[in-house]
Image (cartoon, rainbow, N blue to C red):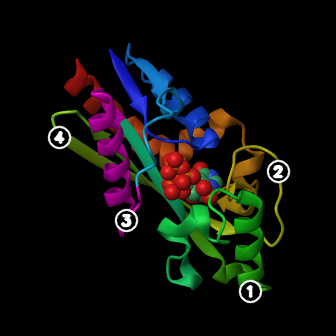
Amino acid sequence: RRLILATRNAGKVTELRAILDAADLDIELVGADAYPDVPDVKETGVTFAENALLKAHALAQATGCPAVADDSGLCVDVLGGAPGIFSARWSGTHGDDQANLALLLAQLGDIADEHRGAHFACAAALALPDGTERVVEGTLEGTLRHTPTGTGGFGYDPILQPLGDTRTCAELTPAEKNAISHRGQAFRALAPVVREMLG
Ligand code: ITT
């Protein structure tokens, strides 16, 4: 059996493979890159869950295979939850992690640490070709650093310091990040659903 990972974000693919491999699903995981002719779906939803479902359904319909999708982002308290679902294109250029992070830091300026609360959020969706769907969510709470630190992970990892840690997500090992992350939580919760629905 085959399960499509409906994402073109390389950082997500690496993490999803590790998280789902650890769940021992006995399923072949195939990246969306294996289907270059399937056009990217427009993320027209207003929530992470809606967008994750849109992406999963688009791949499941186009390929005839079950698909899982991730929609995720960084929600900053003092910005009322922004960039949120716009995290990947905050600077105007989709997927430009450096520019997105730099703009966000500039917007926060020298706001004091006690006002730099934020969380990562992830919605993990499963869609089957017959239209069946499931979606679950996870979050990772933390505070935002004034300067980026660390080289691991992707996106906003160099500025998000999880609560209870002194390091940023970009300083954690991949296993340490997956153990606590929004994505780890969401896809570990989705794994038994995948097993049940594909089994
Ligand atoms: P797909 O739609 O193809 O999955 P995308 O990068 O466009 O890829 P999203 O719309 O879900 O995906 O945007 C996610 C963005 O949120 C991502 O580009 C990062 O900027 C940020 N983000 C999500 N999870 C993150 C994480 O674990 N660490 C750091 N940044 C993260």
The first of marks 3 and 2 along the sequence is 3
Reading the image, the residue beneath label 2 is 150
Residue 75 position in % (x across, y down):
53, 70
- x 67%, y 36%: residue: 174
Q: Earlier in the sequence, mark 1 or mark 4?
A: 1
Q: Is residue 120 visible?
A: no
Spot occupied by residue 10 in the image (x, y as percentages of width and height): 63, 39
Q: Sequence-wise, which precedes: disc 1 or disc 2?
A: 1
Q: Which mark is residue 103?
A: none
Left or right placement of residue 7 versus residue 189 in this view: right
Amino acid at the residue labelled 2? Gly
The residue to which callout 3 is attached is 44
Residue bearing the label numbered 4: 131
Residue in the foreground of this view, choosing between 7 and 83 = 7
Q: Is residue 54 left or right of residue 182?
A: left
Q: The C terminus lies in which quarter of the figure? A: top left
Q: Quadrant of ligand 1?
A: bottom right
Q: Are marks 3 and 4 in contact (CB under 8 Å)?
A: no
Label 3 within 8 A of ligand 1 by Cβ: no
- Residue, x 69% and y 60% (percent of image)? 161
Please tell me which of labels 3 and 1 falls first in the chain: 3
Q: Mark 1 sits on what residue?
A: 111
User: Compared with residue 146, is residue 136 higher up or lower down, i.e. above or below?
Assistant: above
